[in-house]
């Protein structure tokens, strides 16, 4: 493998264990050294790990070649097992590389199906999408990329992806990325058994082939099948709904689309001779969730997989992937790895530091003004002149006192701004909160931090970011993994107790256990 260029003279670093950033651009000869001039994924990943950038011409070339390739695929793609199914990535590039390690290899050694949401929330979204697109260009039959709800103009402007594009490159690059998102397929069927999609199903979906009737080359609308494929969720009481529960209740937590019930899913699967729906779209504490495996001999009708560990650096969740080979559905979990840090919304250090500098300047001015001054010589002055001088000194002292008080107030304001910025930055970096109601700010920093320590509390605090925003607002060390295996119902019968006990034991002992 070709090595990156390094400075001829090593530079002494304050923290030598932290590798230096990659400052040089890749040459076209090195970057496009794959077959038929394809981008070299190995070179690209090594460059991105060092936070290196590409030229805009290089990025545009990769994106345009990827767009041409994606346009050749139908809205609904059909693929065969064995395959690795991957959930949401959300700009966590370093965890994406860990995922490939957990999966057991890169394409073409393994085949992959990604369920969307490659961008937003994390600060390495460009790297994630470009790297996956480079893999797609090199191995088009070994990696498939579906569209998620975040691959659209509305959400990427509301969250971080557009800001990241402009910060690292330009608005023109962002527009090209949007064209690439428009070309992403919407769903997949694996081995005529699994219907794979980002969100789920809706009332307009009767047959998987209905997906091919959509025009995907646009932003998703707020209603209809296109929207449902990307936004819908399983019902909150899935499998135990009441008799009067409609097949597709409204999805108030998302602000659009529907929730689908066990009855709706069973009808769709039965009518199309399918085994289960596999989807992403929802963060899970263990990285996955199995729906409806409570009856003897049944396979879960819905499986959620989420592949972004410690989502938003706050959830402290595990991530998971699914390895499916027609005989065994194997769930592998993994944890997060360290990654570089960015200030919220790519803020520069100068803007960030202004409140700190102001506070120190105010302290300095107060110290200067509080220095006692020497009295003027009063020898040889008449009593009237002495009284006049004393009155002037008193007036000067009063003015100085008022100035000291004013500067003190300014210093307190800067101090409060600094403390508030620290608190909000911590919350932004944890659960993506960009503003808080005043009544919540009054409870204090410690209570706010304590309120988002668990996965459930982080998810609840972050629920506002799971809704459709108003359109007017706009070298990595191996980490132990847990592996859960259970066979396809075509080979053996399983019960809910079997699966739950295996998952629990695997999670506690970090080892693989086969179902009986």
Image: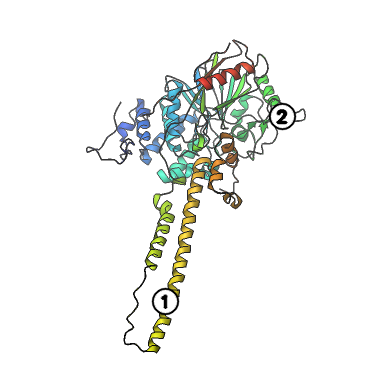
Q: Name the residue located 69 percent from the left edge and 28 percent from the top edge.
A: 261
In the picture, the quarter occupied by the C terminus is top right
The percent coordinates of residue 281 (x first, y second) are 57, 32
Tag 2 residue: 247
The residue closer to the viewer here, 288 or 457, is 457
The percent coordinates of residue 51 (x first, y second) are 37, 38
How crowded pointer 2 is (Cα within 10 Å; few <14, some 14-19, many 20+) is rated as: some
**Residue 288: assigned label:** none
Label 2: which secondary element = loop
Tag 1 residue: 396
| Left or right, residue 448 beside residue 399 | right
Q: Name the residue located 58 percent from the left edge and 14 percent from the top edge.
A: 488
How crowded pointer 1 is (Cα within 10 Å; few <14, some 14-19, many 20+) is rated as: few
The percent coordinates of residue 64 (x first, y second) are 43, 35
In the picture, the quarter occupied by the N terminus is top left
Task: List the single residue furthest toward the right.
Answer: 244
Name the colour scheme.
rainbow
Q: Name the residue located 43 percent from the left edge and 72 percent from the top edge.
A: 400
Question: Is 206 placed above or below 123 here?
Answer: above
Label 1: which secondary element = helix
The residue closer to the viewer here, 353 or 300, is 353
| Left or right, residue 312 beside residue 54 | right
| Count of picture labels | 2
Q: Can residue 226 be seen by looking at this rendering?
A: yes
CA gap, disc 1 and disc 2: 80 Å
The percent coordinates of residue 401 (x first, y second) are 45, 71
């Amino acid at each position: 493998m070709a090595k990156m260029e390094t400075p001829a003279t090593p530079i002494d670093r304050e923290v030598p264990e932290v590798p230096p950033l990659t400052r040089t651009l890749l040459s076209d000869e090195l970057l496009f050294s794959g077959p038929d001039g394809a981008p070299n994924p190995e070179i690209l990943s090594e460059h991105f790990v060092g936070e290196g950038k590409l030229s805009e011409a290089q990025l545009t070339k990769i994106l345009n070649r990827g767009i041409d390739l994606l346009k050749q695929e139908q809205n609904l793609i059909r693929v065969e097992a064995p395959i690795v199914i991957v959930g949401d990535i959300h700009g966590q590039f370093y965890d994406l590389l860990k995922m490939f390690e957990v999966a057991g290899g890169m394409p073409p050694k393994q085949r992959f199906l990604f369920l969307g949401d490659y961008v937003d929330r994390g600060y390495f979204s460009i790297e994630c999408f470009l790297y996956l697109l480079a893999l797609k260009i090199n191995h088009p039959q070994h990696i498939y990329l579906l569209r998620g709800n975040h691959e659209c103009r509305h959400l990427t402007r509301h969250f971080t992806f557009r800001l990241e594009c402009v910060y690292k490159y330009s608005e023109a690059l962002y527009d090209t990325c949007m064209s690439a998102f428009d070309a992403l397929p919407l769903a997949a069927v694996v081995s005529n058994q699994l219907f794979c999609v980002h969100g789920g199903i809706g009332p307009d979906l009767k047959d998987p082939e209905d997906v091919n009737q959509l025009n995907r080359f646009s932003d998703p609308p707020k209603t209809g099948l296109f929207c449902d494929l990307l936004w819908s969720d399983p019902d909150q009481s899935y499998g135990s709904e009441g008799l009067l529960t409609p097949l597709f209740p409204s999805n108030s937590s998302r602000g659009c689309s529907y929730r689908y019930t066990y009855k709706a899913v069973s009808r769709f699967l039965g009518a199309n001779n399918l085994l289960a729906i596999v989807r992403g779209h929802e963060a899970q504490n263990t990285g996955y969730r199995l729906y409806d495996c409570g009856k003897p001999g049944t396979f879960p009708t819905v499986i959620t997989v989420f592949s972004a560990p410690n989502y938003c650096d706050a959830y402290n969740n595990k991530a998971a992937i699914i390895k499916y080979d027609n005989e065994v559905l194997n769930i592998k979990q993994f944890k997060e790895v360290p990654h570089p840090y960015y200030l919220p919304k790519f803020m520069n250090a100068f803007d960030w530091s202004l409140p700190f500098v102001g506070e120190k300047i105010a302290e300095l001015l107060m110290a200067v003004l509080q220095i006692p001054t020497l009295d003027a010589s009063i020898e040889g002055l008449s009593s009237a002149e002495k009284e006049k001088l004393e009155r002037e000194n008193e007036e000067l002292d009063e003015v100085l006192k008022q100035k000291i008080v004013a500067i003190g107030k300014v210093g307190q304001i800067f101090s409060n701004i600094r403390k508030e910025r620290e608190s909000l930055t911590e919350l932004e970096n944890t659960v993506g909160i960009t503003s808080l109601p005043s009544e919540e700010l009054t409870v204090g920093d410690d209570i706010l931090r304590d309120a988002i320590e668990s996965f459930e509390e982080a998810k609840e605090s972050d629920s506002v970011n799971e809704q459709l925003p108003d359109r007017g607002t706009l070298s990595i060390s191996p980490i132990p993994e847990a592996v859960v295996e259970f066979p396809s119902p075509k080979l053996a019968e399983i019960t809910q107790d079997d699966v739950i006990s295996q998952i629990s034991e695997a999670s506690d002992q970090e080892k693989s256990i086969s179902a009986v």
